[in-house]
Amino acid sequence: MAGSDARALSRSLLDLCRMRKLTIATAESCTGGLVAGALTDIPGSSDVIDRGFVTYSNDAKRAMLGVEASTLTNFGAVSKETATAMAVGALERAGTDFAVAITGIAGPGGATPGKPVGLVHFAVAARDGRIVHREHRFGAIGRSAVRARSVVEALRMLMDLARGPAQTKPRRAAAATRLRPRVTRTPRRHVAKRRPPRSPRG
């Protein structure tokens, strides 16, 4: 089921990105390139897919994606912080519109206190500054199943990102313009308050 979902999502995502002239990079750890594989399995994907980073080791995450050693030491490879750093690093190095990152524990081993088998962190980053993180605990459903479900989740996150960038920037711009007039008005109010004491005579 996950395989058919991944193929359908890949087609839809590529069609949408092709229509909007958007490009994608991937940064994968526990999935080992399966997201890039699902996308490039579709003919014509080269219009959208720029590159994929398979950064399985911590050394690879540092060297290829610029993840700070302190991030890996303080939070671990399987963490929100590392997933976010991977996505941002892939985005910066590829120069694409979007990047997705996945890091997790597919099993059967690798669990640590607080980080069970099936824990996967996802992050997507956009050129316009949007970053979204999600954490999933798939449970000990088997290595292949964790990896397959992770691919589907990553594709869904990319789809959400590709659908919505146009609505985010105007809201931020509007908020910024609303704040600026308030800053310029406050000095005028102070000046107005100073004038009344001078007007009374005698």
Image (spheres, rainbow, N blue to C red):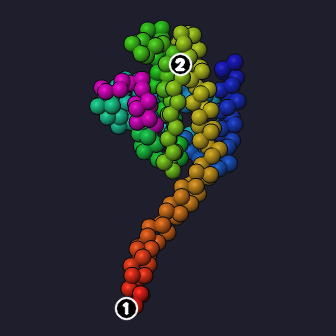
Q: Amino acid at mark 1?
A: Gly
Query: Would you identify the image quadrant in which residue 110 lies?
Result: top left
- Residue beneath the point at 65% across and 50% down: 20
Whether residue 13 is visible here, answered yes or no, is: yes
Please tell me whether the stretch drawn in magenta is mainly helix, strand or loop. Answer: helix
Q: Which x, y percent locates residue 121? A: 48, 26
Mark identifier at residue 33: none
Q: Which x, y percent locates residue 144? A: 56, 14
Q: Which x, y percent locates residue 170? A: 59, 57
Start and end of the magenta stretch?
73-87
* 164 over 148 or under it: above or below: below
Q: Residue furthest front?
A: 202
Whether residue 40 is visible here, answered yes or no, is: no
Q: Residues within 10 Å of mark 1 (few under 14, many from 20)?
A: few
Label 1, secondary structure: give it: loop
Foreground: disc 2 or disc 1: 1
- Residue beneath the point at 44% across and 78% down: 192
**For the N terminus, which image quadrant?**
top right
- Residue beneath the point at 67% across and 31% down: 9
The CA distance from mark 2 to mark 1 is 79 Å
| Nearest the eye: 32 or 183 | 183
Task: Name the residue that disc number 2 marks.
Answer: 137
Q: Residues within 10 Å of mark 2 (few under 14, many from 20)?
A: some
Q: Which x, y percent locates residue 201? A: 40, 91
| Nearest the eye: 43 or 171 | 171
Task: Name the residue that disc number 1 marks.
Answer: 202
